[in-house]
Amino acid sequence: MDSSSTECAGELLDVVPMVMRSIRTEMSRHRITGLSVVQFRTMRFLQHHPETSLIDLTEHLGLTPPSVSKMIDGLVARDLVVRQNSSHDRRRIALRLSPQGEESLDLARRATLESLIAKISSFTLSDCEALCRSLNLLKDAFSDEVIIPEEK
């Protein structure tokens, strides 16, 4: 590993927690539905991976099955998530967002996005382009860590 990679990794360790703290703060400020960050991540995962199983979600979040099950129970009780039989395997329970969940997620995401836009609005066009290129490099580097549920 060269010194530029080491320096860059150190910057990631310093900056990513600050960005996540800002996102959490904004989500808390715009608690239209009272979503926690983990609930938001869960709903975003379900939005991108409809018919996810509880096990797939547990692996994605890195939490224990009982914790995820309890969280899903709460989201189902609030009519944000729906449990249903999988269209691929009747024995499997699939999770998906309800229409209210889709709307709530969209509202929370828009409020957080507006906050992020305000934070970077002073960046030059060149800075924004460089940031987007860097973020795409990160996305590519970490994309193999994203869990995509398999059809069972």
Image (tube, rainbow, N blue to C red):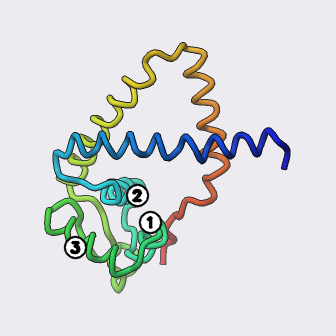
Is there a contact, CB below 8 Å, between mark 2 and mark 1?
yes
Give percent across and percent down for residue 39.
Answer: 30, 59
Whichever of labels 2 and 3 marks the residue nearer the N terminus, that label is 2
Tell which of 64 and 57 is nearer to you: 64
Is 69 placed left or right of 8 in the picture? left
Name the residue: 37% across, 23% down.
118
Cα distance between the residues tagged 2 and 1: 9 Å
Q: Which residue is mark 3?
A: 73
Give percent across and percent down for residue 43.
Answer: 32, 57
Tell which of 2 and 146 is nearer to you: 2
Secondary structure under tag 2 reads: helix
At label 2, the amino acid type is: Phe
Q: Which residue is mark 1?
A: 61
Whichever of labels 2 and 1 marks the residue nearer the N terminus, that label is 2
Is 6 placed left or right of 70 in the picture? right
87 is higher (above) or lower (below) than 144: below
Whichever of labels 1 and 3 marks the residue nearer the N terminus, that label is 1
Residue 94 sits in quarter: bottom left
119 is higher (above) or lower (below) than 16: above
At label 3, the amino acid type is: Asp
Give percent across and percent down for residue 18.
Answer: 47, 41
Give percent across and percent down for residue 53.
Answer: 39, 74
Is 49 placed left or right of 99 in the picture? right
Name the residue: 58% across, 19% down.
127
Residue 37 sits in quarter: bottom left
Q: Which residue is mark 2?
A: 45
Is there a contact, CB below 8 Å, between mark 1 and mark 3?
no
Cα distance between the residues tagged 2 and 3: 16 Å
Secondary structure under tag 3 reads: helix
Secondary structure under tag 1 reads: helix
116 is higher (above) or lower (below) than 41: above
Name the residue: 20% across, 59% down.
80
